Amino acid sequence: MSPPCVVSYWTLFKHFGTILCNTFYARFKLGIPKKIRGSGMRLIVATVRGGLDDYVNQSFGRTPTFTIVDVDENGNIVNVQVVENPGYSQPRGAGVTTAQFCIDQGADVVISGQFGPNSSGVLQAAGIRLVSAPPTMTVREAVEAYLRGELTQAIMGQGGMGRGRGRGRGRWMRGGW
């Protein structure tokens, strides 16, 4: 017979799914990278090509690259790196994979055009702030606008391909009602 602790974690996983387990894992993992980095802030921006001169991508889960910007306590950009999104080419679950990637990178703030429901839930549960920026804004402008307090809210999209919203009748409706 297994210990009660193992049984309760399995029950938690079975009933609440992987999103809850990922957020549980993220809450405990996030504290270490922030303490090592010091008092600065790490912003991750969704981009197409990457870099400070690229524009903010409107899709979070399906963005090809991320530009990771480290800012010191005075608001100066001290480090910039471009990384590929591991969830970019996944057929399903790209938002959750991408959110977990941002958590693993030690993000304090994530900037994108809009966020899906699953990815926003994972990021918010991990204590990461979500901010939306317009598509006409470069990464540098978005970071500076956030630091000035001009970007404050996130736009939540529908997310996923979902169902067809009843547009097609399907084969079962040939005879009508």
Image (spheres, rainbow, N blue to C red):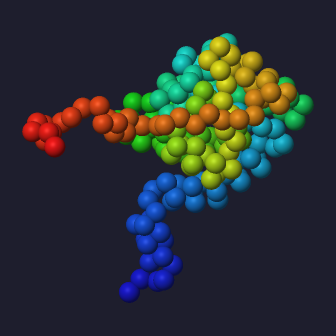
Describe residue 85's horizontal placement relative to residue 171 as left or right.
Answer: right
User: What residue is rendered at 21% in x and 34% in y?
Assistant: 169
* In the image, farthest residue toward the front: 177
Between residue 28 and residue 111, name the one nearer to us: 111
Q: Residue at x 48, y 76 (%)?
A: 8
Which residue is depicted at the point 60% across and 27% down?
113
Q: Position of residue 177 (x, y in %)?
A: 16, 43
Question: In the rendered view, would you say 84 is above or below 37?
Answer: above
Q: Is residue 121 left or right of residue 142?
A: left
Instruction: Specify the quadrant of the image occupied by residue 41.
Output: top right
* Residue at the extreme right of the image, as rendered: 74
Q: Is residue 41 left or right of residue 158?
A: right
Decide: is 172 above or below 51. below
Which residue in the rendered view is the most extreme toward the bottom? 1
The one of 59 and 8 positioned closer to us in this rendering: 59
- Which residue is rendered at x = 80% and y = 27% of the image? 150
> Where in the figure is residue 151, as x and y percent of width and height?
75, 29
Indicate the quadrant containing the N terminus: top left, top right, bottom left or bottom right.
Answer: bottom left
Q: Is residue 165 left or right of residue 118?
A: left
Residue 69: x and y in percent read 71, 28
Residue 39, percent from left and from top: 84, 42
